[in-house]
Amino acid sequence: MANTAVVTSAEWIEGAAPYQTTPGAGLNAKQQMALKLHAMAIELAAVGGTDYTADFESMIDASEALGHWMNCDQVKAAEVLIHYTNAANAGGSVPAATGDKLEAAKKLIEYDFDRLEKAYLFLLGSLGYHSSF
């Protein structure tokens, strides 16, 4: 199956409209997070991982077993680690030291956070689905 990117304005704006917090769609941030987790659980099951779609409690328990003691900074740092690990596992050349990573990414630090978030979304959409287990 081809790796299908989600990187068009139509997908980002019109297609995503039902998931907005604005009047009409009316979701809140917690509902958005729940829907992201649901979508990820569907993807995990589809690629051969554990199917949590009928047992979210097991997914929550598994995540709590790993990170029940983590603060917000540690959670965000773990996300960075996961992205670098995924890049390496996909065959990418990842600098070993944090300083080397920052040096390689220094141009990105010049952009404001809003633009960086859109770039994150662009790359997330560009990556498409993930490999099977």
Image: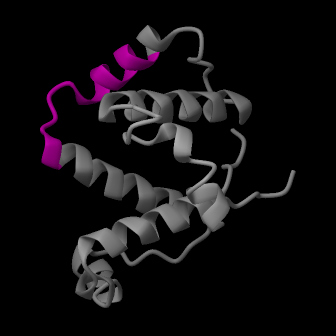
Q: Is residue 114 left or right of residue 54?
A: left
In this picture, residue 40 sits left or right of residue 24: right
- Residue 14 in view: yes
Is 122 included in the stretch rendered in magenta? no
Quadrant of the image occupied by residue 40:
top right
Q: Residue at x 49, y 30 (%)?
A: 35
Q: Residue at x 34, y 51 (%)?
A: 79
Quarter location, residue 91: bottom right
- Residue 8 is situated, as x and y percent measured from the top left of the image, at 66, 66
Compared with residue 91, is residue 48 higher up or lower down, i.e. above or below? Answer: above
Q: Position of residue 24 (x, y in %)?
A: 46, 35
What span is colored magenta in the figure?
A: 59-73
Is residue 94 placed above or below 80 in the rendered structure? below
Q: Measured from the top left, where is residue 77 in percent x and y?
A: 24, 53
Viewer-proximal residue among 14 and 127: 14
Quarter of the image that includes the C terminus: top right
Above or below, 49 relative to 80: above
Q: Between residues 107 and 30, which one lies in front from this camera angle?
A: 30
Left or right: residue 102 versus residue 32 is left
Residue 81 position in % (x across, y down): 35, 56
The secondary structure that dominates the magenta segment is helix
